[in-house]
Image (spheres, rainbow, N blue to C red):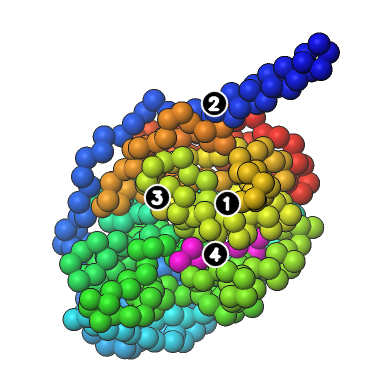
């Protein structure tokens, strides 16, 4: 009788654990209408006035630690002028003008020929300093500015914005304007899918030009940290275009060599108190491949005494409870998830799914096809996974969440928006997600996030 009673108790505990697993977090009652969101006409993104005026200006970090910047722009008709003039707006070298030359590239895609694409890398800048820079000459000269980050350190506060899958629709414009109106963010973490040129006939590369003009109002003034998505592949054998990522890699340069990477599709930077790793969901990542080998070494180079916050950017999410793109990131998860848990990655940001979702801290590293252990479980050494492919692109909203909501999913909503990650010190960061339909003061989702290395306490989602 005692044995039967004990067995019944075990069965009840198992059933209770299954019931607990089946009930997830919150599925927001707000659902944006799934109407079509066509790209805005090309005329909505006119080039700046003047002959051969520089356009599509954008910046990104230009070195490992934040004292460098890559300034990129396009001149449509002539390769010159191919330099940028820059000067500090404050400090000991205020108004002392310097010049940096640009490397120039161009490319052809099907019947399209690009303008002259310039990339000027400036290094040795002062930390936490405002700089002006000027591109072009005479009446076509254009003036911009940016601020360098504070020196890398464990308690340096810093605020990042996060957007993915932006495109160039009216919804995209709402997202970007909403982000720009949020004055706190200092650097954009962009998780892939930029222009959606490949959704147009013959991968219309003029849509790369219009997108570059569209984002200039933000990307010329603060660094955008780039991640490649599936819409950057532009692999089109039917057009005799066999080089993956051709437009993207010609237009958007990153400091990959500073992190000992062999490809601009995966790299890392350190900025303020964060070590940010960018991965490529659409490049080989199996054992012995360059990306696998690089990431294995890169995780050993992370110094949490210097940069406590370890953040990963990739495109295809590993945990996704939407029927759109369901389990497309599974093979990468199986390859790398145990490393993320061992390294105590704080947050993984992904895009691809055109909706918003935030997970609990969970892992599935027990997974083994022979023992049946295939259920994600809570794991306080695991990252929080955030899917933010909700920029507003031409393909519209992903409004097909699975039901019931799985236990690993803390909050999800089918609408467009952007996120803000405000790192306060080595232990605390405040995260908010803002849907486009609300004022910036309203956070549709928010969470105090605790650092996995210094303060590995469970966060309370609600």
Q: Which residue: 21% across, 45% down? A: 36
Q: Which residue: 27% across, 77% down? A: 237
Quote the CA–CA distance across marks 2 and 4: 31 Å
Quote the CA–CA distance across marks 4 and 1: 11 Å
Q: Which mark is residue 279?
A: 4
* Residue 138 is at least partly visible in this image: no
* Residue 123 location (% of width, % of height): 59, 78
**Range covered by the magenta-colored residues:** 270-282
Q: Callout 2: few (<14), some (14-19), or many (20+) C-alpha neighbours within 10 Å?
A: some
Q: Are marks 2 and 4 in contact (CB under 8 Å)?
A: no
Say which quadrant the C terminus sits in. Answer: top right
* Residue with the mark numbered 1: 348
Q: Nearer the viewer, residue 144 or 380?
A: 380
Quote the CA–CA distance across marks 2 and 1: 23 Å
Q: Are marks 4 and 1 in contact (CB under 8 Å)?
A: no
Q: Which residue: 44% across, 87% down? A: 103
């Amino acid at each position: 009788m005692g044995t039967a009673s004990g067995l019944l108790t075990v069965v009840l505990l198992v059933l209770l654990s299954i019931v607990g697993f089946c009930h997830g977090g919150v599925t927001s009652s707000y659902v944006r209408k799934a109407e079509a969101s066509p790209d805005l006409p090309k005329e909505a993104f006119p080039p700046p006035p003047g002959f051969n005026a520089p356009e599509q200006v954008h910046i990104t970090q230009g070195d490992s630690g934040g004292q460098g910047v890559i300034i990129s722009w396009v001149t449509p008709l002539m390769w010159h002028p191919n330099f940028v003039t820059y000067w500090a707006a404050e400090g000991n070298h205020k108004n002392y003008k310097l010049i940096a030359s640009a490397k120039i590239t161009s490319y052809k895609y099907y019947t399209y020929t690009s303008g002259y694409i310039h990339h000027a890398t400036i290094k040795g800048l002062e930390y936490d300093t405002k700089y002006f820079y000027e591109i072009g000459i005479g009446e076509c000269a254009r003036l911009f500015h940016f601020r360098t980050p504070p020196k890398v350190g464990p308690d340096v506060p810093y605020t990042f914005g996060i957007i993915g899958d932006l495109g160039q629709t009216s919804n995209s414009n709402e997202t970007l304007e909403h982000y720009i109106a949020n004055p706190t963010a200092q650097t954009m973490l962009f998780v892939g899918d930029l222009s959606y040129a490949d959704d147009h006939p013959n991968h219309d590369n003029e849509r790369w030009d219009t997108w570059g003009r569209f984002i200039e109002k933000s990307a010329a003034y603060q660094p955008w940290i780039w991640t490649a998505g599936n819409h950057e592949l532009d692999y089109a054998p039917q057009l005799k275009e066999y080089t993956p990522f051709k437009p993207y890699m010609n237009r958007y340069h990153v400091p990959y060599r500073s992190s000992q990477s062999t490809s601009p599709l995966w790299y890392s930077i350190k900025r303020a108190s964060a070590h940010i790793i960018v991965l490529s969901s659409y490049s080989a990542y199996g054992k012995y491949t360059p990306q696998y080998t690089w990431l294995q070494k890169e995780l050993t180079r992370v110094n949490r005494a210097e940069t406590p916050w370890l953040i990963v950017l990739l495109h295809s999410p590993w945990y996704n409870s939407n029927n759109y793109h369901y389990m497309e990131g599974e093979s990468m998860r199986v390859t790398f998830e145990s490393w993320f848990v061992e390294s105590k990655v704080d947050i993984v940001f992904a895009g691809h799914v055109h909706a918003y979702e935030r997970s609990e801290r969970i892992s599935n590293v027990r997974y083994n096809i022979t023992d049946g252990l295939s259920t994600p479980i809570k794991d306080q050494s695991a990252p929080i996974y955030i899917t933010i492919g909700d920029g507003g692109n031409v393909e519209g909203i992903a409004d097909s969440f699975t039901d019931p909501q799985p236990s690993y999913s803390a909050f999800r909503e089918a609408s467009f928006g952007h996120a803000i990650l405000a790192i306060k010190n080595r232990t605390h960061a405040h995260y908010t997600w803002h849907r486009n339909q609300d004022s910036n003061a309203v956070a549709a989702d928010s969470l105090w996030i605790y650092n996995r290395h210094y303060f590995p306490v469970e966060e309370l989602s609600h």
